[in-house]
C-alpha cells in the first residue's frame, strides 16, 4: 500500500547484540525502501523518556529501536495499522 509513497532508499543495519564491552553490534547494510522527512520533534518513548529526533522515516518493512538507518540510531518505531487491524507500514524516528 505504501510502495508508491516509499520512493526513496535508506541503508538499514539491524542490531544483532552487543560485544564484550557492551557496545552495539550491527548486521550487514542493506537498502530499504522508505520516505524520509526532515522533521525535528520531541517524542515520548515507551519507557517515558523525552527524545529529540531529526528525521522521520515512513517504511514498508519493519525496523526496531536500536537499528541503524542511514548510520543514525532508531529511537522510536510506530506501526501503521488499518481499521481491520492489518499492518500497512512503520514510522521510525532517528
Image: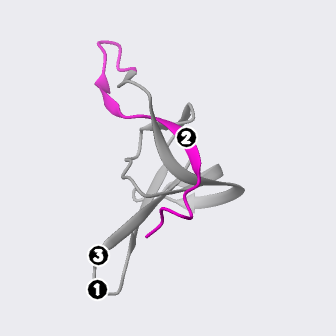
Disc 1 from disc 3: Cα separation:
6 Å
Circles 3 and 2, Cβ within 8 Å, touching? The answer is no
Q: Is residue 9 magenta?
A: yes
Measured in 3D between alpha carbons, the distance from the residue under mark 3 to the one under mark 2, in whole angstroms, is: 24 Å
**Residue bounds of the magenta highlight:** 1-23
Residue that carries the numbered disc 2 in the rendered image? 10
| 26 sits to left or right of 84 | right
Q: Residues within 10 Å of mark 1 (few under 14, many from 20)?
A: few
Q: Which residue is mark 3?
A: 86
Asked if residue 17 is positioned above or below residue 56 in the image, the reply reads: above
SS for callout 1: loop
* The one of 32 and 17 positioned closer to us in this rendering: 32
Mark 3 element type: loop
Q: Is residue 16 magenta?
A: yes
Q: Residue furthest front?
A: 4
> Residue 65, image x and y in percent?
41, 46
Rendering coords of residue 56 (x, y %):
60, 55
Q: Is residue 78 above or below residue 92?
A: below
User: Could you say which is closer to the camera, residue 88 or residue 43?
Assistant: 88
Residue 66 location, x and y as percent?
A: 42, 39
In front: 17, or 59?
A: 59
Could you say which disc has been placed on residue 94 in the image?
none
Quick check: marks 1 and 3 in contact, CB under 8 Å? yes
Q: Which residue is located at x 43 percent, y 70 percent?
A: 1
For residue 84, the mark is: 1
Q: Position of residue 7 (x, y in %)?
A: 59, 54
Direction bottom: furthest residue: 83
Q: Earlier in the sequence, mark 2 or mark 1?
A: 2
Which is nearer the N-term, disc 3 or disc 2?
2
Q: Residue at x 39, y 20 (%)?
A: 23
Query: Which SS class for mark 2?
Result: strand
Q: Quadrant of residue 13?
A: top left
Amino acid at each position: 500500500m505504501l510502495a508508491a509513497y516509499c520512493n526513496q532508499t535508506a541503508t538499514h543495519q539491524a542490531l544483532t547484540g552487543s560485544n564484550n564491552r557492551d557496545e552495539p553490534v550491527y548486521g550487514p547494510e542493506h537498502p530499504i525502501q522508505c520516505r524520509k522527512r526532515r522533521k525535528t520533534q520531541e517524542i515520548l518513548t515507551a519507557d517515558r523518556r523525552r527524545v529529540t529526533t531529526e528525521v522521520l522515516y515512513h517504511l514498508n518493512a519493519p525496523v526496531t529501536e536500536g537499528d541503524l538507518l542511514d548510520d543514525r540510531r532508531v529511537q522510536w518505531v510506530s506501526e501503521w495499522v488499518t481499521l481491520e487491524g492489518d499492518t500497512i507500514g512503520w514510522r521510525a524516528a532517528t
